[in-house]
Amino acid sequence: MTTSNSRAAGLLHLRDRALKRGDPVPLPLTMASIYLSPGDSSDTIEYGRFGNPTWHAVEDMLGHLEDAPCIAFPSGMAAIAATFFALLKAGDRMLLPADGYHTTRAVAERLKAFGVDFDTRPTASFLDGGFAGYRLVFVETPANPGLDICDITAAADAIHAAGGLFIVDNTTMTPLGQRPLDLGADIVVAADTKAPNGHSDALFGHVASRDPEIIEAVRKWRVTAGSIPSPFDAWLVHRGLETLDMRFERMCNTAELIAPRLKAHRAVRSLRYPGLPEDPSYNLARVQMERFGFLISFVLDSEEKAERFIDGCALMHSATSFGGVHTTAERRDKRGDAVPGGFVRLAVGCEPAEELWKAIEESLDRL
Ligand SMILES: *Cc1c(COP(=O)(O)O)cnc(C)c1O
């Protein structure tokens, strides 16, 4: 099996073999809805809904990182919805995390109108109760925003024994931090809007699977439903992916440094970070994750203090989402997550670690 370092190195040279003398070394942006295709055109793209050289280059990069074919989508939600629409039929039942990204449950709610039903379970006890009767089981690990994790290998074994398909939303870790397909998942979905693009200027998503039938069904859904990424956004994500390894390493290193200091601060309660040895997620995180990630969650005494902490920190933006170069934080209660008013999700960015800590500590000290 390749290591994350060898994958990161290879990522920057995927296009080398196709380059001819005089070609631009960086990826050209192709904006086109039509392609010259006289006669039998089955070997060309033909039309902008069927393909685009710029998305294909991003799919090659993501496929290299996942070690699996990938289909790109215009957002993480488009990727998630594509798996549901491509793989479910009336009468099927799904199991979703009770504590993961809320919009995934909102899509499932809409599917009830088409005869697909679902149940939810907390990520921390996801294996309790078994998986009989579920066509599709979906987890997000670590789950956003509570950072509980699920044993992917044990879940995959139990789900497969019960005859179901297993999808993992790997957004919080990226394929450099965790590879669910290696651990037995059938499908990975992810929002590349987050760390893979990394600059908070485009939305993007992908589906990865080593099962050719699944990939074909998802590809067919994209072509027919028209859920296609913009070439320019693909170009931005391609550029972002070129520095993912560096950014992800910096963000994870900084989160590891800051998490114990934050936890020790008198204003901070109930801090969660999978990289702290006393965290409930730690033992499993060490086994199935290559890094501990860059998300930290904790609770301040009130909604008002949480807002003041975020707004008062010179190196932090009050903004949703995560994985960008700028450190951001958000009170997740604002987004409808079932958390206390003072619950903060901190997404560590690429600022130098000690400078970031100084700014965080100053803002906490002022509360
Ligand atoms: C952001 C996010 C999504 C949705 O991604 P979009 O690009 O915003 O559609 C899905 N899952 C998780 C875990 C996320 O954090």
Image (cartoon, rainbow, N blue to C red):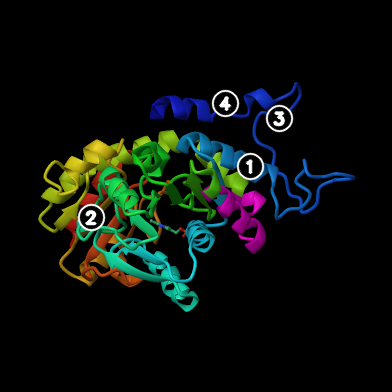
Q: Give the range drawn in magenta.
A: 214-233
**In the image, is residue 230 part of the stretch drawn in magenta?**
yes
Does the residue at mark 2 contact the one at mark 3 (Cβ under 8 Å)?
A: no
Query: Which mark is first along the chain, 4 or 1?
Result: 4
Name the disc covering residue 127, or none.
Answer: 2
Mark 2 or mark 4, earlier in chain: 4
Quadrant housing the N terminus = top left
Q: Would you say the beta carbon of the disc 3 residue lies within 8 angstroms of ligand 1?
A: no
Q: Mark 4 points at which residue?
A: 13
Q: Mark 3 points at which residue?
A: 24
Tell which of 42 and 293 is nearer to you: 42
Q: Mark 1 points at which residue?
A: 56
Depth check, front residue: 85 or 274: 85
Q: Which amino acid does label 4 sit on?
A: His
Rendered-image quadrant of the C terminus: bottom left
| Residue type pointed to by label 3 | Pro
Task: Give the x, y percent position of residue 246.
Answer: 42, 33
